[in-house]
Image (tube, rainbow, N blue to C red):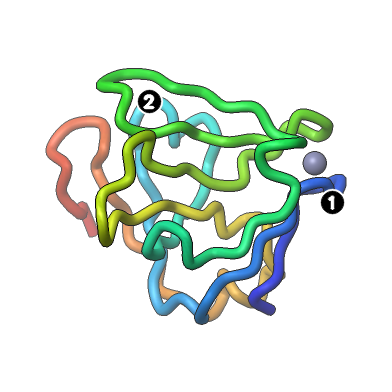
Amino acid sequence: MLEGSCHCGAVRLTLPSAPDKATDCNCSLCRRIGGPWVYYEFGTVKIEGHPERTSEYIWGDKTLRTVRCTSCGCVTHWEPLSPTPGAKHGVNLANFNPRLLASVRVRRFDGADTWKFID
Ligand SMILES: [Zn+2]
C-alpha cells in the first residue's frame, strides 16, 4: 500500500508511513495536475527513477520543483529547491493504490487565494 508509481512504472515511490490526511489544492498549478498531496519530511520518501527518468517544472517564487515522469507524464511529487533541515515535500497520492486515498481525510486548501483550508 505504501508503494506507488507513475503510470508506466519508471518512477517508483515508497512512503515512510501511511498518511492520515491529504490536501486538495486549488492553486493555478494543482487545479490542473491534481493530487491530492500528502506531505513528508524531505528525504524520507524513497524515490526511484528520479531524476534519471523525470523532468521538472519551476514557477512562481521558485521555491520548489514539481516533478513528472518523462515517459508517461504523471506528476509524482514536488520537492524544495533549497531544502532546509526539516523541510517538507509533497507526494501525489494519485500514484498509489486507491485504497490509500480512500483511507485518508482529504482537506480542500485554497492555494489560489487565501492559503487557508476551506472545508
Ligand atoms: Zn511514467
Q: Position of residue 97 (x, y in %)?
A: 71, 70
In this rendering, which labeled residue sits more in front, label 2 or label 1?
A: 1
Ligand 1: give its quadrant.
top right
Q: Residue at x 53, y 80 (%)?
A: 103
Q: Does the beta carbon at disc 1 come under 8 Å from ligand 1? A: yes
- For residue 9, the mark is 1
* Disc 2/disc 1 C-alpha distance (Å): 27 Å
- Name the residue located 33 percent from the left edge and 56 percent from the top edge: 88
When the figure is inspected, residue 76 is found, relative to residue 27, above or below; the finding is below
Residue 93 rendering spot, x and y as whole percentages? 57, 59
> Type of residue at label 1?
Gly
**Residue placed under numbered mark 2 in the picture:** 28
Near-viewer residue (21 or 108): 21
Disc number placed over residue 113 in the picture, else none:
none
- The image quadrant of residue 46 is bottom right
- Left of 1 or right of it: where is 20? left
Q: Earlier in the sequence, mark 2 or mark 1?
A: 1
